């Protein structure tokens, strides 16, 4: 009897379905992504409650970005030191605690401090959640797990605005933060049950100077990119981006001398990782710009209501979800290299077609174009997020996940910046104050032209890259044997 009592929890704990782990991590990330986009919709209402101007509320968004920039690079080291399960569970608890304080905030200053705390938890959830998945899932299941993990990043910005509008219209804006509490509590329980505790091996002392330099650099650049989309903030955003670049250069010089830098740029020498970071960064410029440009196009260019625009843009979420069950089959048939080249071109060109959208286009056709574009790019990001770690050793996995997540967040913000700059630049050349359809077309073309250059980097992947993950080699060898 004692043996049976002892073995029962071990059986449950030893081999949870990889989808369970992927969905635990994905749910935490969805909570974070939805929270950020829901808040943007509620800012005017919150401004009235706090008796401040609506533009002043932007600090509620930028304070969160600052916290992300500071703590994401340190997340891998934290997971190595205290264990990935402990840090991931703590990250969720910090995010929930920050959410409760945000909901209780009596003033804007209090809200900003609460958002900084919430961002600290969010910064740990993103890379440590990915690390948990990497350490918990067999390589043969990596593609399927990553396709589940990708969903929050794609549907969060789409679901957020209509959900925010519903909460602000029918409830109180404080429920934006309260809804995180039950999700977070359930998440912590499932983390405790299903996720194993794994610690890494620290390779040297904590990089305190690098932590400060990278925090200032990334924080300034993220602030600068975010502010570039605000009217009249061009000079300030340029100053912040320049400041970020200066501290970034200082960090690179420091990192060459430190035995275990907070952001390990030597990872870029690993072929699959370095190529995935560069190619993925270029492609994510489109992913970052679309949630910014599409709602503006439909509301300002087409004259649609916010609700109607949201119903069209949800096509991108549907496309992403439709991809999920097909990813593994596609990669096993084509391999990672060919999949990245083909899907990248199709997805980027699809979003480039947004430049041709006009009010006389049938809405079902626009919906289908957006859905197919998201479908192909979902393959793309699933592939990047998987192949990046193909050649990364277990000892460097935590460092790699924090490094990759940092660049992912940075390039999404840069996408907004480039989209906004292209839109405002076209308006300046046209001498108009309100963007016309041609100005939106210019912005879409600029963004997609940058992203399509990822094709040159995708060509640099080895034809055999990720064979163990995709099963591509096994299928090809079997066919050859049969012949």
Image (cartoon, rainbow, N blue to C red):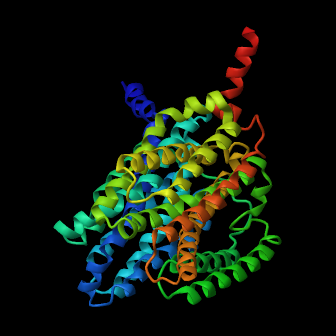
Residue 88 place in picture, x, y as percent: 48, 56
The answer to whether residue 21 is left or right of residue 209 is left
Residue occupying image coordinates x 65% and y 43%: 340
Q: Is residue 57 above or below residue 273?
A: below
Q: Residue furthest top?
A: 482
Q: Is residue 118 above or below residue 136?
A: below
| Residue closest to the eye, 395 or 175 | 175
Q: Residue furthest left?
A: 170
Residue occupying image coordinates x 76% and y 78%: 249
Residue occupying image coordinates x 72% and y 68%: 205
Quadrant containing the C terminus is top right
In the rendered image, is residue 87 in sight? no
In the rendered image, is residue 50 in sight? yes
User: How many numbered marks are there?
Assistant: 0
Residue 214 place in picture, x, y as percent: 66, 75
| Residue closest to the eye, 413 or 438 | 438
| Residue closest to the eye, 426 or 4 | 426
Res 164 → quadrant: bottom left
Quadrant containing the N terminus is top left
Residue 421 place in picture, x, y as percent: 57, 76
Q: Residue furthest right?
A: 257
Q: Is residue 226 above or below residue 55?
A: above
Residue 10 place in picture, x, y as percent: 45, 33
| Residue closest to the eye, 214 or 329 | 329
């Amino acid at each position: 009897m004692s043996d049976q009592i002892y073995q029962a929890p071990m059986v449950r704990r030893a081999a949870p379905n990889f989808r369970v782990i992927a969905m635990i991590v994905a749910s935490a990330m969805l909570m974070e992504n939805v929270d950020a986009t829901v808040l943007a919709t509620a800012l005017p209402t919150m401004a009235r409650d706090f008796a401040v101007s609506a533009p002043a509320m932007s600090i509620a968004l930028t304070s969160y970005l600052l916290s992300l920039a500071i703590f994401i690079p340190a997340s891998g080291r934290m997971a190595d030191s205290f264990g990935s399960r402990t840090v991931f569970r703590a990250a969720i608890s910090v995010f929930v605690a920050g959410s409760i304080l945000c909901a209780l905030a009596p003033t804007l200053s209090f809200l900003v401090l609460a958002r900084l705390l919430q961002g600290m938890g969010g910064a740990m959830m993103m890379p440590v959640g990915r690390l948990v998945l990497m350490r918990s899932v067999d390589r043969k299941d990596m593609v399927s797990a990553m396709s589940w993990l990708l969903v929050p990043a794609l549907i969060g910005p789409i679901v957020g605005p209509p959900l925010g509008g519903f909460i602000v219209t029918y409830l109180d804006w404080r429920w934006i933060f309260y809804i995180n509490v039950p999700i977070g509590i359930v998440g912590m329980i499932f983390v405790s049950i299903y996720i194993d505790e794994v610690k890494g091996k620290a390779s040297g002392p904590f990089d305190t100077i690098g932590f400060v330099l990278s925090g200032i650099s990334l924080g300034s650049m993220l602030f600068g990119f975010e502010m570039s989309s605000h009217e009249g903030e061009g000079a300030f955003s340029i100053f912040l981006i320049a400041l970020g670049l200066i501290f970034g250069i200082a960090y690179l010089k420091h990192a060459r001398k430190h035995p275990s830098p907070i952001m390990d740029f030597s990872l870029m020498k690993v072929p699959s990782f370095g190529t995935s970071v560069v190619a993925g960064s270029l492609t994510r410029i489109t992913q970052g710009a679309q949630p910014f440009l599409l709602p503006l196009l439909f509301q300002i260019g087409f004259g649609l209501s916010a609700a109607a625009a949201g119903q069209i843009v949800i096509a991108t979420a549907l496309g992403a979800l439709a991809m999920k069950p097909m990813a593994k089959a596609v990669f096993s048939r084509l391999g990672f290299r060919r999949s990245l080249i083909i899907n990248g071109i199709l997805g980027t060109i699809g979003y480039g077609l947004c430049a041709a959208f006009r009010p006389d286009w049938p809405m079902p056709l626009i919906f289908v174009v957006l859905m197919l574009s998201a479908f192909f790019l979902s393959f793309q990001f699933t592939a990047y997020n998987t192949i990046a770690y193909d050649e990364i050793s277990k000892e460097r996995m935590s460092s790699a996940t924090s490094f990759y997540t940092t660049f992912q967040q940075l390039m999404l913000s840069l996408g907004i910046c480039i989209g906004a700059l292209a839109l405002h630049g076209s308006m300046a050349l046209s001498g108009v104050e309100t963007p016309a359809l041609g100005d939106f077309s210019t912005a879409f073309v600029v963004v997609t032209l940058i992203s399509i250059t990822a094709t040159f980097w995708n060509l640099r992947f080895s034809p055999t890259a990720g064979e163990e993950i995709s099963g591509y080699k096994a299928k090809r060898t079997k066919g050859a044997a049969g012949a």
